[in-house]
Amino acid sequence: MTRVVSRAVGDPGQVAVWSEPRDDLVRERPVEEDGGEVFEAAEGPFRHYRREVRVEPLPDGRVAATSTTTFDLAVPYFGRLFALPVRRALRRPPGTHRTPWWAPPDRLDPRAASVLGVLAAASVIAGYLGTLLTQTVTYAARDFGVADVRPQGYTLAAVRAGVLLAVVLVAMADRRGRRPVLIVCAVGGCLAAATGALAPSLPWLGATQLVARAFSTALAVLIGIVAAEEMPRSSRAYAVSVLGMAGGLGGGLCVLALPLADLGIGGWRLVYLLPLAALPLTRGIARLLPESRRFTVARTGVAMRGNGRRLVLLAASAFLLALFTTPASQFQNEFLRDERGFSAARISLLTLLTNTPGGIGVVVGGRLADVRGRRLVGAVGLAGGVGATVVMFASSGWPLWAWSVVGAVVGGAVLPALGVYGPELFPTSLRGRANGVIGILGVAGGVLGLLVAGSLSDRLGGLGPALAVLSLGPAVLVVLVLAAYPETAHRELEELNPQDVPPAGPAPAPTPPPP
């Protein structure tokens, strides 16, 4: 339980604001009790909330108001982290009727806050698993005696075929439910990733991580789907930004573990064993995560017909974006190690110091996408992020570090602004399958980008010129976003997908989150 005490001294009219109910981060309601004014939460992301106000006269004619708030956030795993800014917000007097800049535009209820916290924990797992091979393939190749970058590219490309299994998993979630499949993916991904520590060759490593990548890809897709189905209409992009930050934390943990690769020629294998430590976390996720409310009332038998244009638009977008982002991320460590002479520790330092500020872009981009709209935020993030990344790969010394920061901050807005479209634009009973198909096209673009980047880097004398050519893909995507994307901010999923509108009749009560 967290306690916040605020004291104000002044004329009765000046301190009277403390006796008003809040309507910002929390909407308060007065409670009749003797001995002072008491308020409880009518709405807000709290398991417990209580504010007591006592007003005492002073000898000089002024009065002193003491406001004491006790609260417990309904956010598992990350409650203490969010408690810090919440404490600061609750120290301010009521009356502003504005939510803090870091909070979702819509006020979350306890269930939404709980689901978001659980999904964030799952995102940490997905982020680690999705980053694992990218960060370690260059060291594994050295261990296996593979000096050429092309076999690494082939391995990374082959691993992405795991998206086919991921499509099967997310399609199963359309029939069996989001929760059970999500849990299977989290556990299966950790176990499959750990088998990479035993790989005797680069192809064997690729085979083990193909399975792990399938689970982690399906896990990431299902996390986004559940978030869209549970969050209020004006906070879906915010939720994606929070989950993106959590996924970045998982990737950052993988980067922090990368110096293990410098312990010896086989030190990289230790990084593959760390996902086993996440297995206890999956038990907590299984205990706390409820089934999606929209899945429990979804109409079955909805055909893909009528959603084809949206599917083609988002699939083409995923292809164009991955054409650049996949080789840029997958080959970054190889570029830094071979072309810029970075050690594993220095690569970790660069990644953490320059990518961590990207969280600013993710959070601000998520709020702007919810408040101002998705398209403009997404287009600006694409153009600025990709452009800065191209310049980074053409730089050395301190400009390389600076452009990496710019690319991370500006490009960070793309995740919440465009990442929310996949779950938003399809009916509930098709949401998993549609996003699986989009994932296949994204993987196809990534595979082509890896192959082209590997080939062009040899011909053009480095990875930088190759990525400059591949940046044409995101450039076309910017035009698509501005010209063809619908605006989905402030709209309910049922408004975007009329097939999901339930027949007339009383709606079932929402299922509360597990205790």
Image (cartoon, grey):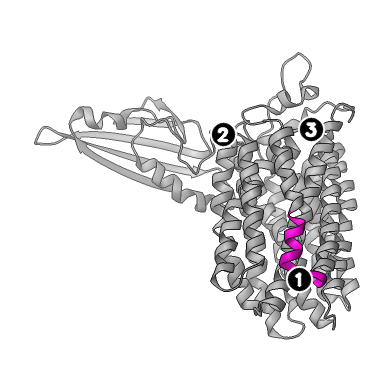
Q: State which region is magenta.
A: 458-471
In front of the other: 304 or 122: 304
Total labels drawn: 3
Q: Residue at x 61, y 57 (%)?
A: 407
The residue beneath circle 1 is 272
At horizontal 77% and vertical 75% (from top left) the residue drawn is 138
Quarter location, residue 129: bottom right
Q: CA distance from mark 3 to mark 1?
A: 36 Å
Mark 1: which amino acid? Tyr
| Residue 372: image tag | 2
461 left or right, relative to 104: right
Residue 148 quadrant: bottom right
Q: Residues within 10 Å of mark 1 (few under 14, many from 20)?
A: many
- Determine if the magenta segment contains residue 470: yes
Residue 127, percent across and down?
70, 58
Farthest residue to the front: give it.
460
Left or right of 152, for residue 509: left
SS of the residue at dot 2?
A: loop
Q: Residue furthest left?
A: 60
Distance between mark 1 and mark 2 Cα atoms = 41 Å
Q: Magenta segment: does it hold 318?
A: no
Image mark for residue 15: none
Residue 108 as seen in the image, left or right of residue 121: left
**Visible residue check, residue 65:** yes
Disc nearest the viewer among 1 and 2: 2
Residue assigned mark 3: 426
